[in-house]
Image (cartoon, rainbow, N blue to C red):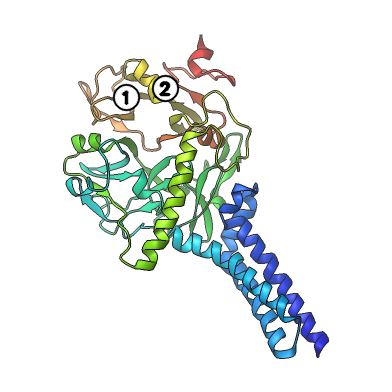
Amino acid sequence: MAVIGNLFFYGGLAVSLVIGLLYFRDLGDVTQMVLKVKRANMVRFIRNENRLLAAGLAGAAIMTLAHFSVGGGPFWLWLAAFLLLVVLYGFPYVWVHVGLRNQKNTAQYLPIKEAMEWVSPSSPVLVIENNGVARAHPDAQIMRPHLAGNREGLDGENVIMTYCAMANLGIGYTPSIEGQELDLEVLAQHGNNLILRDNRTGEPVQQIYGFRDRDSKESENGPTCPLQPQLAMRPWPTFRMTMRGFAKAYPDGKVFINKPSKNPILFLFDLAIETIFSSEISRQHRVNAPIISNMNRNGDDRLHNKTYVWGIDIDGDVVCWTDDFVIENGNIINAKVGGKDLVVVWDPKVESLGIWYNDTAAPVTDIDFFGKTPAGKLTRVENVRPGMFWHVWAEFFPNTEINRTGTASTKSAPGETATEAAQ
């Protein structure tokens, strides 16, 4: 009986420890401070989290039953293993499913006057707008929940703001594919960019791309969804501005505020999580090197890593602009990307950079924040990634051009911008 007990004890111990170590490594997040975790390993655990956890916990249960029922293994080893397993399974699960719990259906949006109790005038905010109805999402407020939206929708449209503090990237998405609503949850980050999971299919979704891994196809510029674009979530035109700029442009707008929980335990837990987040994200903005070095590509030194860029991808033609370049060129840049005429505009009054489709058949020299020109109103480009870190943009779009001007594409070599290459 002792032999059988030991067999089950050590077998259960081995299974539970191996799966626990993998869980802690792949989804524990803090492990990436010291380990370079492969994205493939993360994806495996994201897709199979419940099955792997069930197998690991079953192993722990078998180990426990074997010890207390038939005397398998020594007590000190069972106790040490049990305490270790509590950490290996408990920390990642609580971190992911409680610490990173999102507000995709429950977000609170307050009037500007009330929101100013929580947000300073110079605070950066991410904005989405539909038929004049506008919502602002201050970086500091959406940093922990990562997803914000509610059943009311944006003037009736189902739009969720997704946010990755590591990338300084916010993108509004309609969370559905082929008419099927996605059940999005925050699971991890890789390449300094958020990985979500569609809980209906178990599939990972890289925030910067907006499509499920299973629907992607590799290209020289990274994964794409070229053959079936309907398999990507619809991006919603998203732009950055300051809180004071938002108040000027949309005096009746609403602001997302992540109010502290009334539950005292959750209040203290969230306070600890946000303190850690704020400290590390502040450092991400200050230092050149990514605070978590899980990049797949070599760094691109054409710009400082933490330069903010506004990037777009139209039919595989990838370009980004910096706000200082646009300002230095008179606040307006006309360019062609993916065969489409665009105008890139900095509005100093509301402190916002916008990118618009130019269908006027002529270069635009006069345009306001809302896209109005003497020749008519323009439409915002829907897939702009506004104000994100250069090193993250270059990680996911390595063949990008920088600061394109004019109507022709000029490929830039490493170490020079598109305008320098054209000279």
Q: Nearer the viewer, residue 227 or 65?
A: 65
Foreground residue among 203 and 346: 346
Residue lying at 45% horizontally and 63% vertically, measured from the top left: 98
Q: Which mark is residue 336?
A: 2
Q: Is residue 249 above or below residue 45?
A: above
Quadrant for the N terminus in the image: bottom right
The single residue placed furthest to the top in the displayed view is: 423
- In 3D space, how far apart are the residues under numbered discs 1 and 2 (Cα atoms)? 14 Å
Amino acid under disc 1: Val
User: Which secondary structure lies at badge 1?
Assistant: strand
411 to 287, vertically: above or below: above
Where residue 23 sits in the image (x, y, percent)? 62, 61
Q: Is residue 173 left or right of residue 113?
A: right
x and y, in percent, of residue 392 in the image = 52, 36
**Displayed quadrant of residue 168:** top left
Q: Residues within 10 Å of mark 1 (few under 14, many from 20)?
A: many
Q: Position of residue 322 (x, y in %)?
A: 42, 25
- Tell me the crowding category of disc 2: few under 14, some 14 to 19, or many 20 or more residues within 10 angstroms, Cα based: some
- The residue lying at 68 percent from left, 73 percent from top is 80
Q: Which residue is mark 1?
A: 345
Residue 71 seen: yes
Residue 65 vs 367, above or below: the answer is below
| Mark number, residue 130 | none
| Three-letter residue code for mark 2 | Lys
